[in-house]
Image (spheres, rainbow, N blue to C red):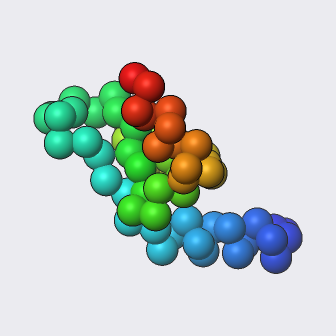
Amino acid sequence: MKSSTSLEAELRQDSLRFKKSSRSGSYTNCVEVAQTLSHLRDSKNPTGSSLSADAAALIRFAKTR
């Protein structure tokens, strides 16, 4: 049985809308970012788990690349 915390996290993740970069074209080996910039996931496994991230830190990281 799942804990209430894991169920809440699952429900929050289900409500997120993810987007893949337009530069990735038809490639499937990409990272998708949630609309809120708070989660990342593997585009090959959209129903899998996502990685939670601090939006400000994610933006700083992306600017250095």
Relative vertical location of residue 48 with respect to residue 7 in this rendering, above or below:
above
Please give left or right for residue 61 compared with residue 44 in the image.
right
Residue at 55%, 65% (x, y): give it: 13
Relative vertical location of residue 29 with respect to residue 17 in this rendering, above or below:
above
Relative vertical location of residue 9 with respect to residue 19 in this rendering, above or below:
below
Residue 6 x/y as whole percent? 76, 66
How many marks can you see? 0
Relative vertical location of residue 58 with respect to residue 5 in this rendering, above or below:
above
Residue at 47%, 56% (x, y): give it: 37
Q: Which image quadrant: the N terminus? A: bottom right
Q: Which image quadrant: the C terminus? A: top left
Please give left or right for residue 60 compared with residue 3 in the image.
left
Residue at 55%, 50% (x, y): give it: 56
Residue 17 x/y as whole percent? 38, 65
Residue at 34%, 28% (x, y): give it: 29
- Viewer-closest of 62 and 3: 62
Residue 59 x/y as whole percent? 47, 43
Please give left or right for residue 13 compared with residue 29 in the image.
right
- Viewer-closest of 63 and 12: 63
Does residue 41 appear in this view?
no
Residue 8 x/y as whole percent? 70, 75
Does residue 25 appear in this view?
yes
